[in-house]
Structure formats: structure tokens, C-alpha cells
Amino acid sequence: MRSALKHLKKDPVLARILAEAGPFTMQYREPKFDSLVRSIVYQQLSGRVASVIYGRLLEATGGEVTPAAIMKLRIERMRKLGLSGQKTLYIRELAKHTRRGKVIFELLPELHDDDVIEHLTQVKGIGVWTAQMFLMFALRRPDVLPVADLGIRSAMKKAWDLPELPKAAEMEKLAESWKPYRSIACWYLWRFLDGPAAL
């Protein structure tokens, strides 16, 4: 981690963010089915709201979110937990794909980042952003730049005083010097945007 931080501090704007944010404390999860379900729940929701809904889902499945436990829940029950109709469908699709062996979580740690994204996005409702969150938080890949993430875009706009939210090409260019530690830089950008207590 020391070498990563030393490398990232070569960017003067990022160096200031790192100094203000304090130590790196990204919370990792296991690269399993429940972690990906969690990412689906968190899509387009604030962390606080998503955490409550995921907690209800965890309770409804008896404390373990597995494909079998998901398929035992009725759609109406899942909706009452606070899940939208779309997210209910996506989670059930993931459960079906996993049970049929179309999504193999044990295989993912061995795959290249792009192959992980391809493997996961075959499931309806799992887009590139969700797959990238899985890469970062479950597979612990150090060099992921989620260009569709509104938080990262907003943090870049604020920190680099940009006139508008940056598009993918501008983000890639700005983050070029952060390689191979863009995931770590992104964690600091989320922290910078939300404040010290957010992550």
C-alpha cells in the first residue's frame, strides 16, 4: 500500500485529497454470490438506504443470501423488503444463472478484469458498473476506473475544478498517471466527495 500511495501522490491534486482523507480503509467482501447481490441492491441508491434494504433481504433469507434462499422468496415478499421490480428480477436472474452453472464465482479470481466483466454482464441487470464494483470490492483488483460512476465523476469535477462532469475519455486521460492503482484513487475520490465519515 505504501508504494501505491507514493505513486498516487505524484498527482498534486490527488496528493492533497490523500492527505485530507487519512488512511486507506476500503472494506472488502468475499467474491461470492451474496456480494454481487449486494452490488445490485446498491445500484442508484444512497449507501444508507441500500444498507437497510440489504439488511432486510439478509434477514428474509435466514442470514445467508444464497441462490436457493433467493428462489424460495416470493416476488411479492422481495418487493416488500424495498426492492424495486427490476432489482427483484435481476437478483432472481442471477440466482437462476448461478444455480445453472452459467455464472461460476469460483472461476472469477482467475480471470482478467475484462473477462470478469464479460462473464457477469451476461446476466440481465448486471451492467459494467456493477461488475466493476465486484472487481474492486470483492476481487480486490487495484486498477479499476468506473467511468460511469456519478460519485467519481462528481469528485473529479470538484477536485479538478472542471466546468462540467467529465466524460469517459476525459476521466481516462486524467487518471492515466494513476495506473496501476486507479481503484485506490477512486476510493479516495469517493471519500473526498462524501466527507470523512462516509466510507
Image (tube, helix red, strand yellow):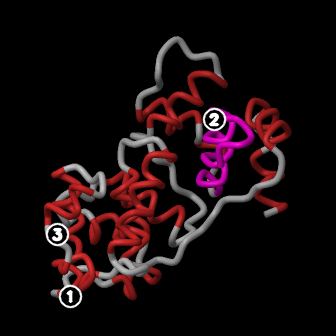
Element marked by disc 2:
helix
Label 2 to label 3: alpha-carbon separation: 32 Å
- Position of residue 152 relative to residue 65, above or below, is above
Q: Residue at x 74, y 36 (%)?
A: 14
Q: Tell me the tag on residue 32.
A: none
* Mark in front: 3 vs 1: 3
Q: Tell me the tag on residue 101.
A: 1
Lower position in the chain sequence, tag 1 or tag 2: 1
Residue matched to label 3? 93
Lower position in the chain sequence, tag 3 or tag 1: 3
The kind of residue on which mark 3 rests is Glu
Q: To which quarter of the image does residue 112 belong? A: bottom left
**Residue 143 relative to residue 73: left or right:** right
Looking at the picture, how far across and down is residue 67, in whole percent?
Answer: 26, 81
Looking at the picture, how far across and down is residue 81, in whole percent?
Answer: 30, 58
Element marked by disc 1:
loop
Looking at the picture, how far across and down is residue 62, in whole percent?
Answer: 38, 81
The kind of residue on which mark 2 rests is Asp
Q: Residue at x 40, y 72 (%)?
A: 59
The residue range painted magenta reads 181-199
Q: Residues within 10 Å of mark 2 (few under 14, many from 20)?
A: few
Q: Residue at x 83, y 36 (%)?
A: 20
The kind of residue on which mark 1 rests is Gly
Residue matched to label 2? 194
